[in-house]
């Protein structure tokens, strides 16, 4: 049974496909972004680079997510072509962004590339919401980003760490773009409509309220501002004080830990994200001390992983439970706006540390108050519901004397899996699945799956 549970938890084909696709997309966009930033540093000042990349660039990424969400909401039939088209446009824009000797063209093409990066993010967050398993979404997101970051670090070691400064980065991104498009086609063919049926069942029981959505967006916005205002990843450090690709490995560690903690318990993941906001104040207190800037990068990137997972999964869950797929990227949208505002605060108040600390403290207090207001709505009822569902399943299995394998079958039938999907999920033959399903139906006195689902849903209700 433990071996089966591990296999079911980590080797679901759709989750693996989704992880690979997201990792490829993030690797393409992050590689393009880093190359653009390094190219800008050769043409304009570090301060101007910060404004372009981490203020205007982040705002344009948020705008790109908003554009994607509007298209998805109004023209859902276009969802299948938006990711390949966005990846191709991103590749085209990347050429002048990393090759142009003219600063104006470098800036313009790079900013437009950020807009497209937002659309790409909207696409893969929609896939995360609709195609990844509900109880593994955070791990899928955390692992995919971590894999992309690890690969980015390995790429940075090519040519003595100068790959992002060279023209070879275009060839690498071209290959990655082609592979990402192929991966997207594969996941689309294999999982068309995945998640839609279960989402629609919850639509009427959990109607979305505009005030709730606004409060959730505001919470993510405040989290992002507080996190970014502590330390703003200054471009002046790149290539001189720190190796950003290496420091991002710490971000990968934060993502992995946050992903698995959040999947294990959404409530614990949220609390960890809130607790991580204390780190900016530690950074503030260490300012002026003889401590290398690399330490600040490590602290900031590690905590960034926790709240990156939280802001994405918060809205991914909301979108899935209410069957409002166009909300999948709302968390990252609000987060990117908050990142830009936090970076702006750092730049504007760079010489006014006391004001910056006071403003960040006020925003932190507002974050805590709003967090616990939403906590009462999001996590306390969820914990009670999850416990009651677990107890109901155990009682149902005990009453009908279901074996461990039959309980596995029941779990997957409740998830609307077909016989072939169950066979693939458990790495057994389809005939074996039919044998266990037949025994399950006989023990519960049901004629078919529909009757089994009805009996289970009404059991002890």
Image (spheres, grey):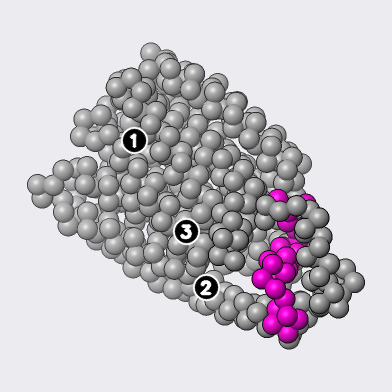
Q: Residue at x 21, y 47 (%)?
A: 295
Which segment did they paint magenta?
Answer: 397-424
For label 2, the SS is loop
Quarter of the figure with the N terminus: bottom right
For label 3, the SS is helix
Q: Vertically, is 454 above or below 178?
A: below
Quadrant hosting residue 425: bottom right
Please state if 340 lies on the left or on the right of 117 as rendered.
left
Work out how far the residue at label 2 is from the one at label 1, CA to CA, in angstroms.
36 Å
Q: Vertically, is 368 above or below 106?
A: below
- Residue 72 x/y as whole percent: 69, 45
For label 1, the SS is helix
Q: Residue at x 59, y 51 (%)?
A: 11
**Residue underneath mark 3:** 260
State whether residue 77 appears in this view.
Answer: yes
Q: Nearer the viewer, residue 54 or 178?
A: 178
- Residue 25 x/y as whole percent: 54, 36
Sequence-wise, the earlier of marks 3 and 2 is 3
State whether residue 346 appears in this view.
Answer: no
Which mark, by number, is residue 109?
none
Work out how far the residue at label 3 is from the one at label 1, CA to CA, in angstroms.
23 Å
**Residue underneath mark 1:** 245
Residue 295 is one of the magenta-drawn residues: no
Q: What secondary structure characterizes most of the magenta part?
A: helix
Please state if 214 lies on the left or on the right of 248 as rendered.
right
């Amino acid at each position: 049974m433990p071996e089966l549970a591990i296999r079911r938890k980590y080797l679901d084909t759709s989750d693996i496909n989704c992880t690979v696709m997201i990792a490829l997309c993030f690797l393409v966009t992050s590689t393009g972004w880093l190359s653009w930033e390094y190219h800008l540093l050769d043409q304009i000042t570090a301060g101007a680079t910060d404004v372009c990349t981490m203020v205007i660039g982040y705002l344009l990424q948020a705008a790109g997510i908003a554009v994607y969400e509007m298209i998805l909401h109004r023209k859902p039939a276009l969802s299948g072509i938006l990711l390949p088209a966005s990846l191709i446009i991103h590749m085209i824009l990347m050429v002048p962004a990393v090759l142009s000797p003219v600063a104006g063209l470098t800036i313009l093409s790079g900013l437009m590339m950020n807009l497209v990066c937002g659309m790409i993010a909207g696409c893969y967050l929609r896939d995360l919401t609709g195609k990844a398993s509900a109880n593994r979404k955070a791990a899928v997101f955390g692992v995919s980003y971590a894999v992309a970051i690890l690969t980015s670090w390995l790429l940075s070691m090519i040519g003595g760490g100068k790959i992002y400064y060279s023209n070879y980065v275009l060839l690498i991104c071209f290959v990655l773009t082609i592979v990402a498009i192929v991966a997207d086609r594969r996941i689309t063919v294999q999982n068309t409509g995945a998640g839609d049926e279960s989402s629609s069942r919850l639509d009427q029981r959990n109607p979305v309220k505009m005030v709730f959505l606004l409060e959730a967006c505001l919470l993510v916005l405040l989290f992002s501002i507080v996190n970014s205002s502590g330390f703003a990843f200054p471009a002046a450090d790149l290539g001189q004080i720190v190796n950003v690709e290496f420091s991002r490995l710490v971000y990968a560690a934060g993502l992995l830990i946050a992903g698995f903690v959040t999947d294990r318990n959404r409530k614990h993941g949220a609390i960890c994200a809130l607790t991580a906001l204390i780190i900016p104040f530690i950074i503030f207190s260490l300012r002026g001390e003889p401590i290398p800037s690399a330490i600040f990068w490590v602290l900031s990137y590690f905590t960034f992983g926790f709240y990156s997972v939280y802001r994405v999964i918060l809205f991914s869950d909301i979108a899935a439970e209410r069957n409002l797929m166009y909300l999948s990227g709302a968390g990252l949208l609000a987060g990117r706006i908050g990142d830009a505002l936090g970076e702006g605060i750092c730049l504007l108040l760079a010489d006014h540390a006391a004001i910056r600390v006071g403003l960040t403290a006020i925003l932190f207090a507002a974050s805590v108050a709003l967090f616990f207001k939403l906590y009462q709505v999001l996590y306390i009822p969820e914990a009670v519901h999850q416990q009651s569902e677990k107890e109901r399943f155990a009682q149902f299995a005990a009453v009908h004397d279901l074996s461990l394998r039959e309980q596995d079958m029941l779990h997957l039938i409740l998830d609307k899996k077909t016989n072939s999907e169950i066979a693939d999920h458990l790495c057994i033959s389809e005939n074996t699945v039919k044998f266990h399903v037949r025994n399950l139906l006989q023990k519960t006195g049901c004629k078919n799956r529909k009757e089994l689902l009805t009996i289970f849903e009404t059991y002890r209700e």
